[in-house]
Image (cartoon, rainbow, N blue to C red):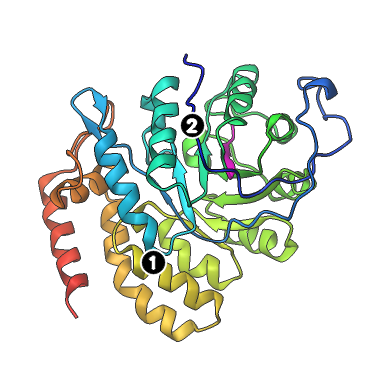
Amino acid sequence: MSDGTAGFDFQPRFFVRASDGGSSIGLVSKETRVPSTSSPTPDFSGLWIPLVTPFRGDAVDHAALTALAEGLAPLGIAGFVVCGSTGEAAALDADEQLAVLATVAQAAPALPRIMGLSGYHLGKTVAWVRRMNEQGLAGLLVPAPSYIRPSQAGLRAWFEAIAEASAVPMLVYDIPYRTGATIARETLLALAAEPRIRGVKDCGGDMAKTRALIADGRLQVLAGEDAQIFSTVAEGGAGAIAASAHLQTARFVQVIRLLRDGRLAEARARWQPLLPLIEALFAEPNPGPLKAVLAQQGLMQDALRAPMTRAGDALRERLSQLLAALSRP
């Protein structure tokens, strides 16, 4: 594992005050807690793009990644999520993840970056978080530990330990169909008391839980299921982390802005034509269909790392038709 990447000229947009209380478990001691700093409450509102990771042969295609980030940056997005599931982070080693993060920082230095995080070994995960503290991030996106399926007390301890090790705000990634662990509403509300846990990427599939989190108001709720962007933001959610917004980006940005301005009818008119595209982009495992479109547009090679596979021919044709229809006045 390398020592990280030097030369970041972007400073984190947010820091929050760390708790003075002890951890609920003895895995992260007071001595290892990141020092407190005083600053405004973080704001994760708006549209975040969870970037794909382009490949050329067996290597990350940093030239394509640079062009992709540079092209998306001026379109009104809030920032980028790097090395998430859309970015095939599970297929990237630690050095590759650091290099991807550095490339995005250099390509779009004015935009904040959230780093995706995953794992199931708490000690190793906390050590990685401490390395991320040096990377000029706006935040971390942290799911439950995969495969293990801990109790709610175990889930709470997991997120609290990671938050205490972090120098930046954290979004809980609630995605039970990937992790195998459902984070209960009561657990999320309890985690809202941890100063560095400031939001949720909501893929939980439970609208009652979504509404409860929005009503509570302590955590910013970002839609993580692209088809739920409209309903989540209309209910008062802060925005979205949306893979499909690599395409028709300005339109997605406009929908969220219209919703947050209370212009529901205008937002609906802009939103509804996007739904068939969103459905098609997730008809096969993400990011296969998305990379197929980006490759057709000449932005990268249509390459994924095993066990991910390329989109089928019929779906490619369907996506081409949908995008052509959206491009017509």
- Rendered position, 257 above or below 105: below
Quadrant of the image containing the C terminus: bottom left
Cα distance, mark 2 to mark 1? 33 Å
**N-terminal of the two: label 2 or label 1?**
2
Main secondary structure found in the magenta portion = strand
Task: Name which residue lies at 67% across and 46% down.
Answer: 184
In the orientation shown, which residue stands out farthest toward the top?
Answer: 1
Task: Name which residue lies at 54% across and 65% down.
Answer: 232
**Disc number lying in front (2 or 1):** 2
- SS at badge 2: loop
Residue 243 located left or right of residue 157: left
Where is residue 233 shown, x and y percent of the image?
54, 68
Residue 193 located left or right of residue 235: right
Asked if residue 154 shows in the view, the reply is no
Which residue is under mark 1? 252
Which residue is under mark 2? 7
Q: Amino acid at mark 2?
A: Gly
The 10 Å Cα crowd at callout 1, few under 14, some 14 to 19, many 20 or more, is many
Magenta residue check for 227: no
* Residue placed most toward the observer, 249 or 266: 249
* Residue placed most toward the observer, 86 or 1: 1
Asked if residue 291 shows in the view, the reply is yes
- Rendered position, 296 above or below 35: below
Choose top left, top right, bottom left or bottom right for residue 85. Answer: top left
